[in-house]
Image: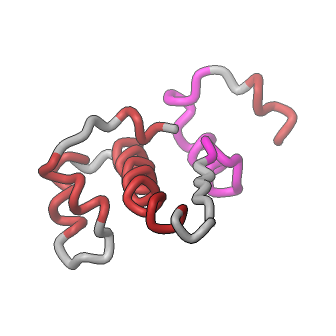
Amino acid sequence: MMGHAIPPNPEYDDALRNPNRKDSFSIVEPFVEGNSDTMYNFTKRGVLLLCEDNVMRFGNMGARIVTISPGVVFSPMVKQAWNDHPETNGSTAPYDSCW
């Protein structure tokens, strides 16, 4: 999970823990610097933080929190991005059977 690629930082962790706050995006945005890959990693960190914050609360009720954070799902949108930006793709060999 790429959420581990984003280091803990009190400047943005609170915004990631509270994504419904009106200023959450504006707090995180300067750290992302317009990079969608970095934003993806920040959202994964947010999922981790939300789970960590709620695990005891739900665990005390007998519930379990599980997150699923897949890597790239080869959807039509990803396929289009793959085709539009071949310079960032490396080898297509693992995905040739998806075409």
Residue 48 position in % (x across, y down): 43, 50
Residue 19 position in % (x across, y down): 32, 69
Question: In this rendering, is residue 80 above or below 15?
Answer: above
Of residue 6 and residue 98, the one placed in the foreground of this image is 6
Residue 24 position in % (x across, y down): 22, 67
**Please, which colouring scheme is shown?**
secondary structure
Of residue 65 and residue 62, the one placed in the foreground of this image is 62
Magenta run includes residue 72:
yes
Residue 12 visible within the image: yes
Identify the residue at horizontal 31%, vertical 62% (top origin).
Answer: 17
Task: Say which quarter of the image contains residue 98.
Answer: top right
Question: In this rendering, is residue 19 above or below 77?
Answer: below
Q: Residue furthest right?
A: 97
Q: In which quarter of the image is the C terminus?
A: top right
Residue 36 visible within the image: no
Question: In this rendering, is residue 89 above or below 39?
Answer: above
Question: In this rendering, is residue 79 above or below 58?
Answer: above
Give the tally of numbered discs.
Answer: 0
Of residue 62 and residue 50, the one placed in the foreground of this image is 62
Residue 50 located left or right of residue 20 = right
Identify the residue at horizontal 56%, vertical 71% (top origin).
Answer: 61
Residue 10 located left or right of residue 97 = left
Residue 28 located left or right of residue 80 = left
Identify the residue at horizontal 21%, vertical 59% (top origin).
Answer: 14
Magenta run includes residue 17:
no
Identify the residue at horizontal 19%, vertical 53% (top origin).
Answer: 12
Q: What stretch is highlighted in magenta?
A: 70-90
